[in-house]
Amino acid sequence: MPKQWRLLFLLVFCTPPAFAQQSAFTYDSQVYQPQIKTVQAYNTQKEQSLPVIALHAKEQLLFTFDDLEGGSKNYAYVVEHCTADWKPSGLSTLDYVTSFAGDRLQDYEYASGTLQNYTHYRLQLPNEQVQFKLSGNYLLKVYEDGKQKIPVISQRFYVVNNLVGLTIDVTTAPDVKQRYTHQKVNFSIATNRLRIQNPNTDLKTVVMQNANPLTTNYNSKPSFVKPDLIQYSDLKTNIFEAGNEFRKLDLRNLRAAQNKLQDKSRNEQTYSTQFDENGNFYIRNMEGRLAETESDYVKVAIQFDAPGPLEPGDIYIIGRFNNYALNDQSKLTYNVSAKAQEGSLYLKQGLYDYQYVFKNSKTGALEKTLLEGSYFETTNAYQVFVYYRKPGSRWDELVGYLSTQTDTLPPKQ
């Protein structure tokens, strides 16, 4: 074997870490099997957009993943309607789909020309088997055929029936103490197409930053209600830590792959303008090959410099590539001799945004900016969802959705 191939083999072909199987689905985006990698879900109109599709439109959700065990398996899927806060809505499948609630995954391709063997699976929704009747939150469940109680993947997605208009305004925080570190989201709902009797009880709104479920803010009551206009602009709500621009990892070129991350805290630094993708990732390679089936996998070692362990709690590396999940695969472990927090990732060739967060084990609090800093100038994407439950109804309809990105906020006063 030539020397360069031996080096490439050591870099790429390694077994991903195993983790325990789970015996039940959660109502979250989660991977349950160690051989499943690179889960993607987005509206086909824009790569890596949030998986939101319009009801009764020509829009489709694209859902893909890789199985590193290769071969072909009889994977199946089912979709379930959920409440605004991601609990089972309890509806019959006949209430929210026109025919079937699931089917087998029949669209797959084998990897070609890669050292890591895998099979790439694809699913588009809606399709001939699954057509949606209701808007709302949905959970896609993937399992091996005949083993529905053994989860493989769960994926949140949204079906929206745009019955209201949305406008979003992102400003600096009104509190002087937060003006350098936080951003505030105000939004208005135009209801001329939907008559809402009591917004305080019939409406629920949700705001997220960078499609990160860990940042979810639920709003129960509006600030002002006017004819055909409902405003959410209370001075103490929807205030987010602005954070910092995401760090970047480039794995497109195997010969120059960034197979080690050597990072340190950015909390004491000043803000520096840097282009990022607000947490997203894109599967790409620079070898001129098909991205989805001819991109290889790379093991990336992580070393985060730290004079001592942060206590009480743990550091995690997260991004949309792992659904911002705080689990054993994203957790770092302190190495006394190296004076660093260490971990590893097994990733497909591409471009990745990532960041570090700290979870306090005593309080359960997630400190998102302890290691990254927080600067009001940071560009972020914000998503607003509007849910409506008709009086006497049994489900939450998703009647409005909008995503906006901050550009340059006005200078601090």
Image (cartoon, grey):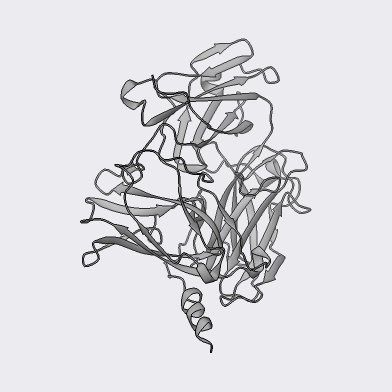
Residue 149 in sight in this render: no
Q: Residue at x 76, y 49 (%)?
A: 99
Residue 328, position as x, y percentages in the image? 37, 61
Furthest-bottom residue in this view: 1
> Is 8 above or below relative to 403?
below
Furthest-top residue in this view: 227
Residue 229 in sight in this render: yes
Total count of labels: 0
> Is 118 above or below relative to 360?
below
Residue 31, position as x, y percentages in the image? 51, 59
Q: Residue at x 43, y 25 (%)?
A: 172
> Is 253 above or below relative to 172?
below
Q: Residue at x 39, y 57 (%)?
A: 327
Q: Which one is nearer the viewer's eye here, 278 or 52?
A: 278
Residue 408, position as x, y percentages in the image? 50, 30
Q: Which one is nearer the viewer's eye here, 82 or 271?
A: 271
Residue 213, position as x, y percentages in the image? 47, 43
* Quarter of the rendering containing residue 290: bottom right
State which quarter of the image contains the C terminus.
top left
* Residue 61 in the figure: left or right of residue 266: right
